[in-house]
Amino acid sequence: MVAVVGLTIGLAGSLRDVRAATGSAVGQVSGSGSISVGGGTTTVTLNLSTDGTTAAPTGTFSISDGVNPTSAGVGTCLFISGTTATIGVHLPDPGLYGLLSITDNAPGTDTLWLDTPVTTGPVDCTTSPSPGDLLSSGDFTVTIGPVPTMTPGPSIAPSAPPTPDPSPGSTPAPSPDPSPGSTPAPSPADANGDGIDDALQPLGTPAGSFLDESLTPATSGSIVATNGLSVTIADAPNAAEGVVVTVGTEVPGAQVELLTCAGGFTVLLDAGTTTVGTCGSVTVAVTFGRAVVVLGDGLTVVSIPAGGAASVADNGDGSFTVENVGLAGSAPVSLTVDGTTTAIAPGPPITVEAWDFVGFGQPIDALPVLNRVKAGQSIPVKWRLLDSAGAPITDLASAEITVTTYSCAVGMTIDLLEEVAAGASGLQNLGDGYYQVNWKSPTSYANACKAMHLNVHDGVLHDALFEFTK
């Protein structure tokens, strides 16, 4: 249970319109804090209001706890004079925190101290501190008690202001030992049984910066920031749960690449995404935004939305195991193989292949064309399989066809299948990656529309639509 929480807030971007001479009081600021725990996240909210000073900057900030000072989430800070601005931060693990601080992602040294502690319980708290004086000539840090001895008015001078978290791109100092009475993070574990401790260490960072000393040997990963996006990397509250990665929103629609220690995977994080990643067989849990795991040079993609989690393992034979490891009812994970997408619900893992499906061959036209054919006719289903390097897959062992009924759509493009005669049914390996199955449609399909689903065991179904005539 959290008894007392100190919040340190900094605004990215400066309050240029409210600056006066350095050290002078330019406004009164009041605030309140709250914490709520539930649904697998901890939400920290700080409300601030001023007494009429004109200011409306927007920026980003990060939050850390006193046990693991580099563990972070990210939110957006909105400070508008004369109104109450709400700042919400979600942490991926509720945990127990001895101290929570929110620090500006941009440099700044000016400080606002609100002189009443914020007392919190496990659900919420709305204890309001007394107003404090705002002193600044640029960016700000806001602290809600307990605070050092201070004097109100222009002479406010905290005796020991907190050290802000490093701005994105800088090298953070090693994490200090937990403060007395705090709960230390447990030793990392091989949660997925792949023989690798499930934690990430960003490449190029000094030993101890993001590394639990109990990790032997250290696993590694790296972040590649692109298109001007900022990246914040931090330990998760529980070392076994990996590393929190948060992506800025400077370029909406852009992505950041996460290179994992497992190898064989590319994880792309959308702008504004907060994820928790583990090493070995890569596991990605998304708190906000979306993460995409790219396999087989882009032929296979696993998309994980906010609230979802997936684990991906390289089987070493060109195939991958994908598992939706979210709780029942959590956001579905999407699997796309060569342009065909299917949803994966929480449950047993599935095996997917990073194959390029080339099809269908004539006489069948692929979606969205509606193929018109006489019921009872045998239809040759032809395709080719290539690997991610373009080499033919020549050892496909089996393929199955299933059929479902759907309503014939008005206005669809219709292709009349020529009369065809097929040989024996069953999978035929024609060589060089070419395959064929002969589908004998029953006469009972007359005057009906059917969807044919071909399963070549690459993780998705390949579909074609048919309208059957008498």
Image (cartoon, rainbow, N blue to C red):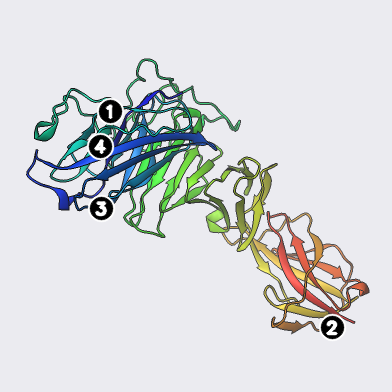
User: Alpha-carbon distance for marks 4 and 1?
Assistant: 12 Å
Above or below: residue 329 compared with residue 201: below
Disc 3 residue type (three-letter): Pro
Disc 4 residue type (three-letter): Val
User: Which is closer to the viewer, label 2 or label 3?
Assistant: 3
Mark 4 and mark 2 lie on one chain; the one further toward the N terminus is: 4
**Residue 170 percent coordinates (x, y):** 27, 40
**Residue 65 percent coordinates (x, y):** 37, 29
Q: In terms of depth relative to the viewer, which is nearer, 351 or 228?
A: 228
Q: Mark 4 points at which residue?
A: 142
Q: Mark 2 points at which residue?
A: 419
User: Alpha-carbon distance for marks 2 and 3?
Assistant: 69 Å
Q: Name the residue under label 3.
A: 57
Above or below: residue 67 compared with residue 291: above
Please state if 18 lies on the left or on the right of 447 as rendered: left
Q: In terms of depth relative to the viewer, which is nearer, 141 or 418?
A: 141
The residue positioned farthest toward the right in the image shown = 443
User: Alpha-carbon distance for marks 1 and 3?
Assistant: 26 Å
Name which residue lies at 61% across and 58% down: 336
User: Which is closer to the viewer, label 1 or label 3?
Assistant: 1
Above or below: residue 443 compared with residue 121: below
Mark 1 and mark 3 lie on one chain; the one further toward the N terminus is: 3
Mark 2 and mark 3 lie on one chain; the one further toward the N terminus is: 3
Mark 1 and mark 2 lie on one chain; the one further toward the N terminus is: 1
Q: In terms of depth relative to the viewer, which is nearer, 61 or 39?
A: 39
Name which residue lies at 24% across and 29% down: 115
Please state if 98 lies on the left or on the right of 188 as rendered: left
Q: Is mark 3 on a helix, strand or loop?
A: loop
Disc 2 residue type (three-letter): Glu
User: Alpha-carbon distance for marks 1 and 2?
Assistant: 85 Å
Q: Name the residue under label 1.
A: 116
User: Which is closer to the viewer, label 1 or label 2?
Assistant: 1
